[in-house]
């Protein structure tokens, strides 16, 4: 009997001996389900009213897996926010066209009749103290740093922050105060005006460069 036990192949070892093994494909699928569930729940209820247990239940995953893959609810909120943002693609590209791309992104959002996931998440979570730090990280990593990296000359970070204020400030003002007049403005004219505003924000010294 002892000899048979000694000869037992390694692959037949009990789960307690071998430890849990989850194929990479399964891990990635579970991770995607958790992100999707978190996105929907944060967008519907806001940060404070969503628990890790709720997210795990909606994703049909173990609560421990949420913490293993993302570390915390705050980190998960930040990853959903970053992943849903279209600004990475807008900012990337030819630096000379950055002001125009930002302006057109702004105008596209004016035409949206339904709020985006990111908008709902921010609106329903902005009063939470934890979310403030998450938003600061999002602003820095997704908007400010990528814009600053596109800029030459002095005070690149300050100019990137000014452009970020234009990007982030318009939406809350429209939604909170009910300012909808811009939605009826001519999109091409609005894009031209916003391009001039972003150009002034991004240009060293606030001047508008010839040909822009």
Image (tube, rainbow, N blue to C red):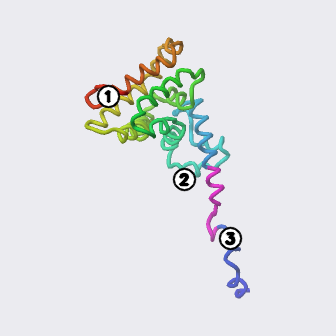
| Crowd rating for badge 3 (residues with CA inside 10 Å; few <14, some 14–19, many 20+) | few
| Crowd rating for badge 1 (residues with CA inside 10 Å; few <14, some 14–19, many 20+) | few
Which badge, 1 or 2, comes first in the chain's sequence? 2
Q: Quarter holding the N terminus?
A: bottom right
Q: Is residue 18 magenta?
A: yes
Of the two numbered discs 3 and 2 in the rendering, the one whose residue sits closer to the viewer: 2
Label at residue 209: 1
Q: CA distance from mark 1 to mark 2?
A: 49 Å
Image check: 173 left or right of 15?
Answer: left
* Residue beneath the point at 43% across and 27% down: 168
Q: CA distance from mark 3 to mark 2?
A: 23 Å
| Secondary structure found at label 2 | helix
Label at residue 68: 2
Indicate the position of residue 208 as horizontal and vertical percent values. 31, 25
Image check: 207 left or right of 178?
Answer: left
Q: Quarter holding the C terminus?
A: top left
| Secondary structure found at label 3 | loop
Q: CA distance from mark 3 to mark 1?
A: 70 Å
Label at residue 14: 3
């Amino acid at each position: 009997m002892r000899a048979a036990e000694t000869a037992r192949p390694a692959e037949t070892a009990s789960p307690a001996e071998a430890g849990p093994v989850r194929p990479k494909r399964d891990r990635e699928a579970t991770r995607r389900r958790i992100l999707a569930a978190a996105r929907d729940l944060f967008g519907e209820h806001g940060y404070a009213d969503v628990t890790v247990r709720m997210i795990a239940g909606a994703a049909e995953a173990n609560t421990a897996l949420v913490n293993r893959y993302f570390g915390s609810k705050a980190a998960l909120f930040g990853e959903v926010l970053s992943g849903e943002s279209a600004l990475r693609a807008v900012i990337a590209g030819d630096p000379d066209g950055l002001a125009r791309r930002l302006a057109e992104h702004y105008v596209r959002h004016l035409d949206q009749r339904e709020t985006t996931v990111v908008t709902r998440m921010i609106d329903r979570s902005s009063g939470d103290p934890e979310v403030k730090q998450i938003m600061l990280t999002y602003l820095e990593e997704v908007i400010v740093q990528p814009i600053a990296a596109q800029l030459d000359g002095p005070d690149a970070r300050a100019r990137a922050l000014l452009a970020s204020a234009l990007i982030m400030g318009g939406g809350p003002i429209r939604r909170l105060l009910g300012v909808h007049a811009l939605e009826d403005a001519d999109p091409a004219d609005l894009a031209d005006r916003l391009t001039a505003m972003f150009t002034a924000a991004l240009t060293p010294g606030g001047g508008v460069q010839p040909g822009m």
